[in-house]
Image: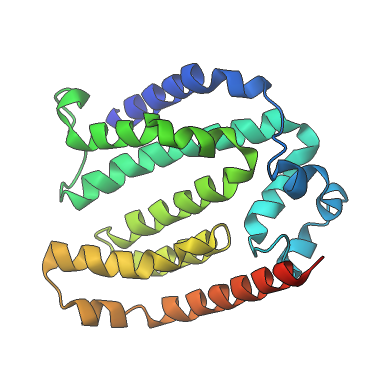
Amino acid sequence: KRTIHIALLFFSIALMVYLPLFGAGYLSWDDDLHILTNARLIDGDIFYFWRHIYFGLYIPVIYSIWTLLAPLGPEALHTVNVAIHTFNALLVYFLLHRLMRRAEPRQTGSLLTEPEFWGAAIFFLHPVQTAAVSWISALRDLLGLCFTLLCLLVYFSKNSRRKKVSFLFYVLSLLCKPTAVVLPLMIAVIEYFRRRAPLARQIARFWAWYLVALVQVALTQLAQGASAQSP
C-alpha cells in the first residue's frame, strides 16, 4: 500500500506541475533535427538507427521510441517524458531506501519522516529537472537515467542472481545515453563505502561492463569525428 500511495502522490503532482506541457509543441533546438526533419524517422525505418550512427550519437533505443511515437504528435512525446520522470522519482525513492539498508518500506508512520521520500521529492521537483522533462530531445537523459536507476536497484538487491539483469539494464542505459559508461565505477565506489570492500577488487569485477563501455566510447568518438568532418 505504501508503494501505491507514493506512486499516486507523485503522479498527481506531475499532472499539476507539468500540465502545460501536454499542449506544448516541439522546440527548434534539436527537436527539429532529431524528429521533424529526420527522414529515416519519418519513414518509420527503426532498424536504420540500430545499424547506423545518427547526429553524432549511437542511441538506437531513443530513436526507436521517437519513430514509434512521433506520428502521434508532440503531446505523446511530452507525456512519455513526464511519465518516465515520475517513474524515475519512484526509483530514486526505492534506491535510497535500499542503500539505507532497510528490508522493506515502512508500513506505519508518515512519509514526512522518511529521508528517502524527501530525497526522491527533491529529485522530482527540483527546477533543474524542468529542461529534461520539457524538452522532447531530452528523452535520452530521462530514459538513460531510468535504466541506470534500475541497474543500481537490481544490483543492490539481496538476490545475487539478479546481477546479470543489472548488466542488461546497463547496456540499455548506454544505448540511451553514452555517459552511462561511468556506472560500473559508481557501483564500485558505493560498494566500497557500504562494505569497505577493496576498491581495486570491486573495479576489476566489472571487466565485461568495461568492454561494453569501450565499444560505446569508440562508437561515440567515431560518430562525433564523422559529424565534425561533415559540411
- Looking at the rendered structure, the number of numbered marks drawn on it comes to 0
230 versus 20 height, above or below: below
203 versus 54 height, above or below: below
State the residue in front, 199 or 94. Answer: 199
Q: Is 63 situated left or right of 213 in this image?
A: right
Instruction: State the image coordinates of residue 3 (x, y, percent, origin top left).
Output: 32, 32
- x 49%, y 32%: residue: 130
State the residue in front, 6 or 182. Answer: 182
Q: In which quarter of the image is the C terminus?
A: bottom right
Q: Is 166 situated left or right of 218 in this image?
A: left
- x 48%, y 37%: residue: 85
Instruction: State the image coordinates of residue 45 (x, y, percent, origin top left).
Output: 83, 57
Q: Is 51 situated left or right of 159 in this image?
A: right
Q: In which quarter of the image is the N terminus?
A: top left
- x 67%, y 73%: residue: 225
Residue 76: quarter of image: top right
Instruction: State the image coordinates of residue 159 (x, y, percent, origin top left).
Output: 28, 62
- x 52%, y 49%: residue: 141
Q: Is residue 118 visible?
A: yes
151 versus 216 height, above or below: above
Instruction: State the image coordinates of residue 58 (x, y, percent, origin top left).
Output: 65, 65
Residue 27: quarter of image: top right
Q: Can residue 67 be seen in this view?
A: no
What kind of colouring is applied to the model shown? rainbow
- Residue at the far left: name it: 196
